[in-house]
């Protein structure tokens, strides 16, 4: 099979030919149609932000495809079934991937393989941030600070479906147009220093999903309503805040990492995403498509500013 590999942290990703994978008693073997690319994949390859890997390393945690073999102890799935995976054993940027049953979920008929490859990290992250960490409720106001990427667009769709008012930001004109098209109630340019003033005038915010906390967190806090919550989804450094902004609003800041999701949470999250896809409001947006040999370019693209959705590899 063809697979992408790195031989050490910071290595250039290369397309290699390797032996086909064989399924064990507790595993599922999937023929990958599309792999999803997320910032965390680049961190793992680089050995950055506390991530590491064993080598040779095949990147990728998300994929969609068809089951081609099942371990003898695996139940609840069938050969030929359309599925997506959230995590894997062997890495998803390859023609074949092994995954445990807890990492594999049915792919709704309403979604393509490309869209299915976007569910595992972006949508699960958005759902957990909104409804597990922030305990977001209908009629609350949510601000997604950096909303035109995969997680941000997922959060926008989920929050609107839950009955929330949604404010959203993007840096590019095209990104802001996409957010409006996706139903955001207010869209601002987060490169414009006056966007905080616009948000303050629009009303207090109950929940902020922050994609770049090292740059924005200190300025987010004055926007909060009484009892407001900030969920930090992304950060690339340190930041200074004024704790009195929290004290005056009885507010809180919380971190969020999918690695801490319990098995019960994951079951609930992916059941909700399946239902959302069937209902028509879970609709991943594809920004850029690459082929397997160009995975290194996809890793560059996913870290660029001006996101317009998800990055995928068509295998």
Image (cartoon, rainbow, N blue to C red):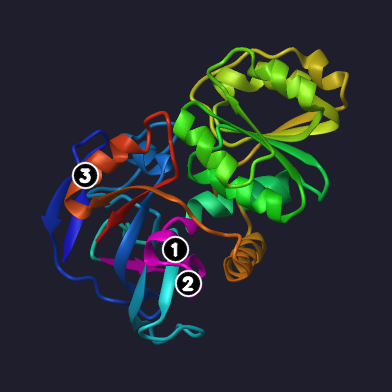
Image-quadrant location for residue 185: top right
> Which quarter shows the N terminus?
bottom left
- The residue located at (77%, 21%) in the rendering is 200
Using a 10 Å C-alpha cutoff, classify the residue at mark 1 as few (fewer than 14 neighbours), some (14 to 19) or many (20 or more): many
Specify start and end residues of the magenta stretch as a single range. 96-119
Q: Which mark is residue 107?
A: 2
Q: CA distance from mark 1 to mark 3?
A: 25 Å
Q: Which mark is residue 116?
A: 1
Q: Is residue 195 magenta?
A: no
Mark 2 or mark 3: which comes first in sequence? 3
Report x, y in % for residue 59: 31, 50
Query: Marks 1 and 3: which is nearer the front?
Result: 1
Dot 2 falls on a residue whose secondary structure is loop
Is mark 1 in CB contact (under 8 Å) with mark 3?
no
Q: Residues within 10 Å of mark 2 (few under 14, many from 20)?
A: many
- Whether the residues at callouts 1 and 2 have beta carbons within 8 Å, the answer is yes
Q: Which mark is residue 6?
A: 3
266 displayed left or right of 11: right
Of 207 and 201, the residue lying toward us = 201
**Residue in the image at 57% along x and 22% along y:** 190
**Disc 1 or 2, which lies upstream in sequence?**
2
Query: What SS does tag 1 mark?
Result: helix
- The x and y percentages for residue 16 are 12, 54
Mark 3, other Cα within 10 Å: few <14 / some 14–19 / many ≥20: many
Picture quadrant where residue 270 is located: bottom right
Q: Is residue 276 left or right of residue 109?
A: right
| Residue 238 location (% of width, % of height) | 55, 18
**At numbered mark 3, what does the secondary structure look like: helix, strand or loop?**
loop
Identify which residue is drawn at 24% across, 60% down.
Answer: 94
């Amino acid at each position: 099979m063809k697979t992408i590999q790195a031989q050490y942290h910071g290595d250039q990703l290369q397309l290699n030919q390797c032996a086909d994978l064989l399924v064990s008693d507790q595993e599922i073997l999937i023929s990958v149609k599309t792999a999803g690319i997320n910032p965390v994949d680049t961190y793992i390859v680089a050995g950055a932000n506390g991530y590491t890997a064993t080598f040779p390393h095949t990147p990728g945690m998300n994929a969609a495809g068809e089951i081609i073999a099942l371990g003898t102890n695996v139940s609840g799935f069938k050969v030929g079934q359309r599925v997506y995976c959230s995590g894997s054993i062997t890495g998803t940027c390859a023609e074949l991937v092994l995954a445990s049953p807890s990492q594999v979920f049915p792919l709704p008929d309403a979604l393509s393989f490309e869209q299915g490859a976007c569910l595992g990290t972006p949508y699960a992250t958005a759902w957990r941030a909104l409804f597990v960490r922030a305990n977001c409720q209908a009629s609350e106001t949510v601000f997604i600070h950096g909303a035109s990427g995969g997680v941000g667009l997922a959060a926008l769709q989920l929050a609107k479906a839950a009955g929330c008012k949604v404010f959203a930001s993007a840096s590019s004109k095209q990104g802001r147009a996409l957010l409006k098209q996706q139903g955001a109630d207010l869209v601002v340019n987060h490169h414009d220093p006056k966007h905080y003033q616009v948000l303050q005038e629009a009303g207090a915010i109950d929940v902020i999903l922050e994609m770049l906390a090292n740059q924005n967190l200190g300025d987010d806090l004055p926007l909060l309503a009484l009892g407001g919550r900030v969920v930090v989804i992304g950060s690339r450094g340190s930041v200074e805040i004024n704790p009195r902004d929290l004290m005056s609003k009885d507010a809180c800041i919380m971190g969020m990492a999918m690695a801490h999701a319990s098995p019960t949470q994951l079951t609930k999250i992916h059941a909700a995403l399946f239902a959302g896809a069937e209902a028509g409001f879970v609709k991943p947006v594809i920004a850029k498509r690459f082929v397997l040999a160009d995975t290194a370019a996809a890793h560059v693209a996913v870290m660029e500013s001006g996101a317009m959705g998800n990055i995928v590899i068509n295998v």
